[in-house]
C-alpha cells in the first residue's frame, strides 16, 4: 500500500502493523516515493551476513516493482 507522508504519520500504527505482516508500505511526499517501511524480519534477512550482500543489493530486491506504478528514482543516475 502507498501512504502520503501525513497519513503515514497519523496512522503509523497501521503502517507498522501491515509492514510487520510482510506487506511493505510505501510512503510518499508530494506524490513521490520517499521511504519503504518493511518488517524487522525482512530487514534482518536482507542484511544478514550469511547472505554476503550489502544494503544496496538488498534494496535492489525491494518488493516495489516496475509494474507497481510507483516511480523510483535511481540516485546513481543523476
Image (cartoon, helix red, strand yellow):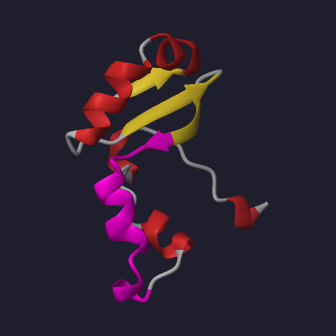
Question: Residue 15 versus residue 71: which sits nearer the camera?
Answer: 15
Q: Residue at x 29, y 57 (%)?
A: 41
Q: Which residues are magenta?
A: 36-52
Q: Which SS does the magenta portion mostly show?
A: helix
Whether the magenta-drawn stretch holds residue 66 is answered as no
Q: Nearer the viewer, residue 8 or 33?
A: 8
Residue 56 sits in which quadrant? bottom right
Magenta run includes residue 45: yes
- Image location (x, y in percent) of residue 48: 38, 77
Instruction: State which quarter of the image contains the N terminus.
Output: top left
Q: Is residue 24 left or right of residue 28?
A: left
Q: Residue furthest left?
A: 21
The percent coordinates of residue 34 (x first, y second) are 60, 37
- Residue at coordinates 39% horizontally, 52% vertically from top-left? 66
45 in relation to 66, above or below: below
Query: In the rendered image of this protein, does residue 14 appear above or below residue 71?
Result: above
Of residue 73 and residue 39, the one placed in the foreground of this image is 39
Amino acid at each position: 500500500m502507498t501512504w502520503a507522508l501525513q497519513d503515514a504519520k497519523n496512522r503509523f500504527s497501521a503502517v507498522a502493523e501491515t509492514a510487520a505482516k510482510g506487506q511493505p508500505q510505501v510512503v510518499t511526499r508530494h506524490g513521490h516515493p520517499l521511504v519503504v517501511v518493511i518488517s524487522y524480519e525482512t530487514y534482518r534477512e536482507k542484511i544478514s551476513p550469511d547472505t554476503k550482500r550489502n544494503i544496496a543489493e538488498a534494496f535492489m530486491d525491494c518488493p516495489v516493482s516496475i509494474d507497481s506504478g510507483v516511480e523510483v528514482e535511481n540516485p546513481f543516475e543523476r
